[in-house]
Image (spheres, grey):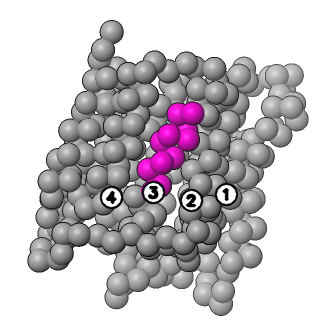
Amino acid sequence: WALMLVLSVAIYGSHAPLLTVCKVDGRIPFSSASVVVLVELTKLLFSLLSLLTCNPELPRAVMSWHHVVPFALSALLYAANNNLVVHMQLFMDPSTFQVLSNLKIVSTALLYSLFLRQRLRSRQWLALLLLVAAGVSYSWGGLREPGSPSGMRLHITLPGLFLMSVYCLISGLSAVYTEAILKTQPLPLSLQNLFLYVFGVLLNLIGSFWSSKEAGFLEGFSFWVLVVVVSQAVNGLIMSVVMKHSTNITRLFIISWSILVNAFLSVALFSLQLTPLFFLAVLCISLAVYLYYGVT
């Protein structure tokens, strides 16, 4: 478990630096829709291989459409949020998105407590609010280029604020809904993943063709893009294990701790500087872990 969680933290934290390494002349040369399709397809193949290896004689009697159909909604929610992120950029700047997207921690916790009937104590709510504070602090200015101004202005329109609310709601709902399905169905995780990723591939293929331009499906791909695809696929599989055998709250802590990896890679690769807000974020996360897991 420990190795798996550390690997997930490393993958989350290295995602943004890897995308920066992939850039050519300051721009992303590949289609993000193509990458999402390939990530879903890779997860599907891994799940199929795992199912054939670990459960080769799975009885058909345990499977029915009642097991399959719920994953269509889960895949639809994930696909909707992936597309919503793209359209939200028209109504706010990237910095504002990074800061406000931390509110999905609150929405996930609220939906987790409401729909899964997992009552959180006051100190646990305080811990989650500290995670939000950590994310906001780091996004606000945990890293900066040498010589750049320390302040950051946020810009968001009223439609952007509405879309951000929808994004946080769907983000929390998709995570909690998927956790509920994974835990209530008496099926192997590899089979459940197979159902989810079949729908994921189909929906994202439709989205890819819908938004595709004249550029080819694999145009702009490189070795580093392949690393992004494989790492995101592995992390998606790890998250399914976390939701099946742990909780979405664990997932939130993994995402929060990943800012350490993101920061150190950014400093090492791009010569960015750490600011006091970074250390404030680390302090908030450490205190959150203590409050949520350490206090009896």
Residue at (33, 58) in percent of width and height: 139
Q: Nearer the viewer, mark 3 or mark 1?
A: 3
Q: CA distance from mark 4 to mark 1?
A: 24 Å
Q: Nearer the viewer, mark 4 or mark 1?
A: 4
Q: CA distance from mark 2 to mark 4?
A: 16 Å
Residue ID for mark 4: 139
Mark sitting earlier along the chain (2/3): 3
Q: Quadrant of the N terminus?
A: top left
Asked whether 218 or 149 is in front, the reply is: 149
Marker disc for residue 164: 2
Residue ID for mark 3: 100
Are the residues flagged by discs 3 and 4 in contact, CB closer than 8 Å? no
**Tag 1: amino acid:** Ala
User: Residue 62: where, in percent of width, then height?
Assistant: 82, 22
Q: CA distance from mark 2 to mark 1?
A: 16 Å
Marker disc for residue 79: 1
Rendered image quadrant of residue 189: top right
Asked whether 155 or 3 is in front, the reply is: 155
Q: Which residues are magenta?
A: 100-110
Visible in this render: residue 82? no
